Image (cartoon, helix red, strand yellow):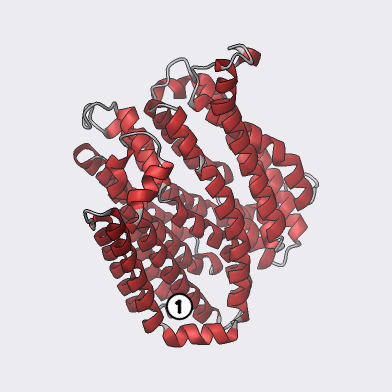
Amino acid sequence: MSNLKKLAGQTAVYGLSSILGRSINFLLIIVYTAYLNKADLGAFTGIYALIGFLNIVFTYGMETSFFRFSTGKNLPTQQVYANTQSLLILSSLVLGTGIYLLAPWIAETMEYPNQAYLFRWTALILVFDAILAIPFAKLRLENKALTFAGAKLLNISLNVFFNILLIVWIPSWISQGLIEDGFLGYQSNWGVEYILLANLLANGLIIPWVWAKAGFFKFSLEKSVLLPMWKYSLPLLFMGLAGVTNELLSRLLFEYLLPENFYPGLSSREASGIFGANFKLAILMNLVIQAFKYAAEPFFFKQSSDKNSPELYAKVMHYFILFCALLMVAISVNLSWIGPIFLQGSGYEAAFSIVPILLMGYLLLGIYFNLSIWFKITDHTKYSFWITLLGAVVSILVIVGLVPSLGYLGAALSSLACYLVMSVTCYVLGQSYFPIPYQTGKDIFYLFIAFGLSYLGFYLEFDEAIWSFLAKNLLVAMFLGMIIILEKKQLNQLRKRI
């Protein structure tokens, strides 16, 4: 149980930084919906979906490979770090140059005429992200959670600062006559451009500090080290693409699949902006999963040699589901007042009903992450390719088949369908190769109850707002009470040992 306590403690540190940082970053959606038009939000949604896909290509699973070869292959961590970081620097520069040169073609293809500079900046953002990935992974491996958290918070704080400076403060200074329009090349008609520039500046400024904290390295490309790592990580590339396929493909393709005038008074790009903004409302679930992943991945590898590790993995999964299911209900039933706080302006409430589906999709992503440990510690990462391919096919079929007729709902269902199929497939295969005693029946029961309560609470309304609020949150209390009653024995044992 001390291992669970250690994992919980590190998750709390990562979670605090992630939740604080992302919460600060999340507040930008208030700025975007208040100061930018829906077309700019649509552009933001589409371009950042592309960045999400390409981030996976630029790192191609080397973070997980770094953990595996630093902990289970009898290689010095510094040697693995030097080789991995050297390879990523080289490959990211090659890939980034390719995107930079292809920027005019990409701009025309994605219907951004005469805006090739957007994709040149995108190339630089991707390069910066890639060369920071392994230093951040090394901080996690060395249990430097506070240093990791500090770096992430600094990066996000800089990003927020530059966003507010470029989108809010400078236009205000211009309107007050404090500075002239065009000062230092400032263009008042830009929107998504300043989101990209803020990201680029924030990432670039923290690179020296993060590299120094992770430890400098000697450029090294040793075939004996990198070839096995490459074979291990290549299937993980496809696994990562499946994850972003579910999370990002709907946002990337939405405006191109949605028929014109599907939503009266909105262009397809404006409707994409509404869809992307509502995706942000599910971010709290993603925060929990990200914080858990930061702590759990190195933890799982370090525990893999323990004979009791299967039981430990099962307990981690069970408590993860309990917490996330309760969070899903709490967010869903309170969307009627949470949504308008963060999404300023009119029209965004039209897609509130898809948020519970998106929350469940993120929860299934977390479950899949837990389940995927079996092929990572048994070196059967080839299975990630097939699971990934299946998930991607399901996601694409649902998106293409349902978005033209169901709009927002069709895109959200792709998230649910993809991760559900991937989780079930990963579970069945994992129990054959590396059996783990998951509390499957009980976990599925909690998921069904939580999803049902989420939608019941979302649609539950009374004439008086206070009665609606109390009734909705009574459902949260009921679900929590059910967990406490059904899990009383395990919770008491956990409390005593922690």
Task: For the C terminus, give its image quadrant.
Answer: bottom right
Which residue is located at x 40 percent, y 37 percent?
Answer: 344
Q: Is residue 200 left or right of residue 357?
A: right
Amino acid under label 1? Ile
Tell me where residue 384 appears, x and y as whole percent: 45, 58
Q: Is residue 181 left or right of residue 382?
A: right
Image quarter for residue 78?
Answer: bottom right
Q: Can residue 178 be seen in the rendering of this structure?
A: yes
Location of residue 10 with respect to 90 vertically, above or below: below
- What residue is disc 1 on? 436
Tell me where residue 392 appears, x and y as whole percent: 36, 49
Q: Can residue 95 be seen in the rendering of this structure?
A: no
| Number of residues whose C-alpha sits closer than 10 Å to that of mark 1, classed few (under 14), some (14–19) or many (20 or more) | some
Tell me where residue 481 appears, x and y as whole percent: 37, 77
Which residue is located at x 38 percent, y 29 percent?
Answer: 38
Image quarter for residue 90?
Answer: top right
Location of residue 456 with respect to 438 vertically, above or below: above
The residue most toward the left is 405
Label count reads: 1
Which residue is located at x 54 percent, y 27 percent?
Answer: 167
| Residue nearer the viewer, 353 or 181 | 181
Q: Is residue 391 left or right of residue 4?
A: left
Tell me where residue 82 appears, x and y as whole percent: 75, 50
Task: For the N terminus, give its image quadrant.
Answer: bottom right
Location of residue 34 with respect to 387 vertically, above or below: above
Which residue is located at x 43 percent, y 55 percent?
Answer: 385
Q: Is label 1 in a helix, a strand or a loop?
A: loop
| Residue nearer the viewer, 223 or 196 | 196
| Residue nearer the viewer, 176 or 300 | 176
